[in-house]
């Protein structure tokens, strides 16, 4: 039964992230949000006493491992890692990531959950928001931009 709940959660959160992407100026990986959001919500449910740790421990471990691999994959794409450095980059992300997952699972609690949330937000910012901000040209003076646009339209 737990695997059905987890699968449905991944699908629902993935779909919601896909919908939200239509509103956001930057794009978040929907399946990444589905997997990470599911293990995060499972931990919240466990900490609130709504879910049994014994029933969900293995699934949370699998999902957290998937998140680590997803971070490595997205990082490779987003950080423009050169092909000759793929293995180095993935190793530098995945090995410490699995160690961090081990410690997160060994110390399930509210403080660990807050730290996990901070890490997820930092990765999301680094991989999805920051590249969007770099691509956007800065607009310092909207009036000046509008004036220049008018001049360009009327020049010929």
Image: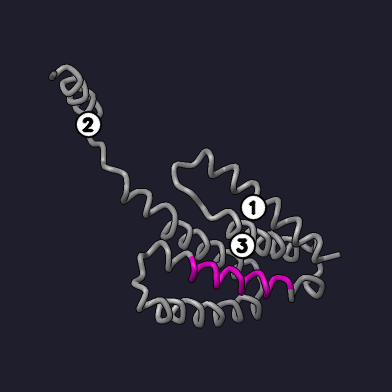
Colour pattern of the rendering? one colour
Q: Which residue is mark 3?
A: 36
Q: Earlier in the sequence, mark 1 or mark 3?
A: 1
**Rendering coords of residue 5 (x, y %):** 80, 60
Of badges 1 and 3, nearer the viewer stands 1
Query: Which residue is located at x 48 percent, y 58 percent?
Result: 124
Q: Is residue 70 magenta?
A: yes
Label 2, label 3: how many angstroms apart (C-alpha)? Answer: 39 Å
Label 1, label 3: how many angstroms apart (C-alpha)? Answer: 10 Å
Q: Is residue 72 magenta?
A: yes
Task: Please tell me how crowded label 2 is: few (under 14), some (14-19), or many (20+) other residues with Cα within 10 Å.
Answer: few
Of badges 1 and 2, nearer the viewer stands 1
Q: Which residues are magenta?
A: 59-73
Q: Which residue is mark 1?
A: 14
Q: Is residue 67 above or below residue 22?
A: below
Q: Earlier in the sequence, mark 1 or mark 2?
A: 1
With 148 as the anchor, is 69 left or right in this view? Answer: right
Q: Residue farthest to the left?
A: 155
Q: Quadrant of the N terminus?
A: bottom right
Query: Which residue is located at x 45 percent, y 46 percent?
Result: 26
Q: Quadrant of the C terminus?
A: top left
With 90 as the anchor, is 30 left or right in this view? Answer: right
Q: Which residue is mark 2?
A: 141
Q: Magenta stretch: dominant SS?
A: helix
Q: Quadrant of residue 153?
A: top left
With 39 as the anchor, is 143 left or right in this view? Answer: left
**Rendering coords of residue 63 (x, y %):** 66, 69
Query: Which residue is located at x 53 percent, y 44 percent?
Result: 21
**Rendering coords of residue 52 (x, y %):** 81, 69
Q: Nearer the viewer, residue 45 or 37?
A: 37
Q: Are marks 1 and 2 in contact (CB under 8 Å)?
A: no
With 148 as the anchor, is 81 left or right in this view? Answer: right
């Amino acid at each position: 039964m737990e695997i059905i709940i987890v699968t449905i959660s991944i699908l629902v959160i993935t779909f919601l992230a896909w919908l939200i992407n239509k509103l956001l100026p930057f794009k978040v990986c929907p399946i990444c949000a589905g997997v990470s959001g599911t293990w995060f919500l499972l931990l919240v449910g466990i900490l609130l006493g709504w879910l049994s740790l014994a029933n969900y421990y293995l699934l949370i471990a699998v999902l957290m491992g998937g998140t680590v691999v997803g971070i490595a994959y997205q990082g490779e794409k987003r950080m423009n890692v050169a092909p000759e450095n793929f293995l180095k980059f993935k190793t530098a992300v995945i090995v410490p990531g699995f160690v961090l997952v081990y410690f997160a699972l060994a110390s399930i609690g509210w403080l660990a959950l807050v730290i996990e949330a901070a890490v997820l937000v930092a990765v999301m910012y680094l991989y999805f928001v920051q590249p969007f901000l770099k691509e956007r040209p800065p607009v310092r003076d909207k009036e000046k931009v509008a004036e220049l646009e008018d001049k360009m339209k009327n020049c010929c």
